[in-house]
């Protein structure tokens, strides 16, 4: 018993039994590895955003309040910030790759699903220098995508400004709107997910989820000019496909309807199971759309509507219309 009287020896012993049991049934590695750090990755995302928008999100320490950075200073800040945060990102990706190979089943221990892209050239017997090579390769490929990510974010910010009559400026949208913060993190996470760092990507996504209340799986494909207004409670599943100029309001769910199981009773992973939302669709607050259905181009889905079937293009679906269709002319009595 320790000085405070907690009787921690018994607690520590029981916790050790749980760890031993997990190792015994193959759920964890006999020699567990550290996992990527949520704190480090949150800081990396903040630095990436500052590098993409240096005149708005750069630290006050590098410029005078109310004044723009000179061009040469801006380029230096962007280059220095990217170099620093990409090194930290590479380190976290290296940890993920090493952890994946040390897990039960090696590479297959994590990357067992079509939802998770495999690392090109990786193998269960990958050497440390090969892990370093792949971590560098993923990070470099990610860096090359940053200009395209900036272009997408510009379209998202513009869509938020144009779509919200309360928005006074693009700057306000960038620094205040939770939906913009969420889609910024998603653009980074989605790129990393596609390059073979799904755990790092998921940590980034869940950090944004905690900060904004918007839950976007990094596997979701989202087109340009996306606007998630208010944001709180929005859920977008990992195989969802969202087109261009789509607008969602709070508490919208793009989820799965059912979960098929294999012969052993485990959920089958990698099956497309979330909605396809085509261009120019608006989905209002509280709507729930489940399964691999298609919401046609230009459709409008009203608040609190529950959908498990596809909707033709240019269709307006409201709760009142659904009730009328279901119970009209004495139906349902």
Image (cartoon, rainbow, N blue to C red):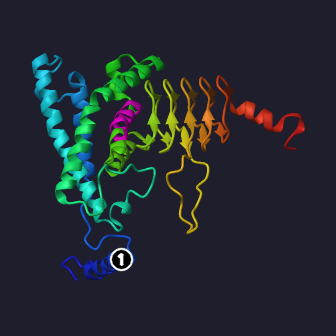
Question: Quarter of the image containing the N terminus?
Answer: bottom left
Coordinates of residue 154 in the picture (x, y in percent): 35, 22
At 28% from the left and 74% from the top, the residue drawn is 30
Q: Main SS type for the magenta part? A: helix
Left or right of 324 on screen, residue 289: left
Q: Position of residue 189 (x, y in %)?
A: 35, 41
Residue at position x 14%, y 36% from top? 83
Image point 37% across, 26% down: which residue? 152
- Inspect this view and state whether residue 158 appears: yes
User: Is residue 211 in view?
Assistant: no
Q: Position of residue 230 (x, y in %)?
A: 46, 31
> At numbered mark 1, what does the secondary structure look like: helix, strand or loop?
helix
> Percent x, y for residue 17?
33, 80
Magenta span of residues: 179-190
Q: Is residue 99 left or right of residue 296?
A: left
Q: Within the image, what quadrant is residue 137 found in?
A: top left
- Quadrant holding the C terminus: top right
Residue nearest the viewer, comparing 109 with 208: 109
In this rendering, is residue 185 above or below 261? above
Name the residue tied to disc 1: 18
Count the marks.
Answer: 1
140 up-or-down from 263: above or below: above
- Decide which of 122, 48 is in the foreground and name it: 122
Q: Image quadrant of residue 45? A: top left
Q: Residue furthest right?
A: 330
* Mark 1 surroundings within 10 Å by alpha-carbon count, few (fewer than 14), some (14 through 19), many (20 or more): few
């Amino acid at each position: 018993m320790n000085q405070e009287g907690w009787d921690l020896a018994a607690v520590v012993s029981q916790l050790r039994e749980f760890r031993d049991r997990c190792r015994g049934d193959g759920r964890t590695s006999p020699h567990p590895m550290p996992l990527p750090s949520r704190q480090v990755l949150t800081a990396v995302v903040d630095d990436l955003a500052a590098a993409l928008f240096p005149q708005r999100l750069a630290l006050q320490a590098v410029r005078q309040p109310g004044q723009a950075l000179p061009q040469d200073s801006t380029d230096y800040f962007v280059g220095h910030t990217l170099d620093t945060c990409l090194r930290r990102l590479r380190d976290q990706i290296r940890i993920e790759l090493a952890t994946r190979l040390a897990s039960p089943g090696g590479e297959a221990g994590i990357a067992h699903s079509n939802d998770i892209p495999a690392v090109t050239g990786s193998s269960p017997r990958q050497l440390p220098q090969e892990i370093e090579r792949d971590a560098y390769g993923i990070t470099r490929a990610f860096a090359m995508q940053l200009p395209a990510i900036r272009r997408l974010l510009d379209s998202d910010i513009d869509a938020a400004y144009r779509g919200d009559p309360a928005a006074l400026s693009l700057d306000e949208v960038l620094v205040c709107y939770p939906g913009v913060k969420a889609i910024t993190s998603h653009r980074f996470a989605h790129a990393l997910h596609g390059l073979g760092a799904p755990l790092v990507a998921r940590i980034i996504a869940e950090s944004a989820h905690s900060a904004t209340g918007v839950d976007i799986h990094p596997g979701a494909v989202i087109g340009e000019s996306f606007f998630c207004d208010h944001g709180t409670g929005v859920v977008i599943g990992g195989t969802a496909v969202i087109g261009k100029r789509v607008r969602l309001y709070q508490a919208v769910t793009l989820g799965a309807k059912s979960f098929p199981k294999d012969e052993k009773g485990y959920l089958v992973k990698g099956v497309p199971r979330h909605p396809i939302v085509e261009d120019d669709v608006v989905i209002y607050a509280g709507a729930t759309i489940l399964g691999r259905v298609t919401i046609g181009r230009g459709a409008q889905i009203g608040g609190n509507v529950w959908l498990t079937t596809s909707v033709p293009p240019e269709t307006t679906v409201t709760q009142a219309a659904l009730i009328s269709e279901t119970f009209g002319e004495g139906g349902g009595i």
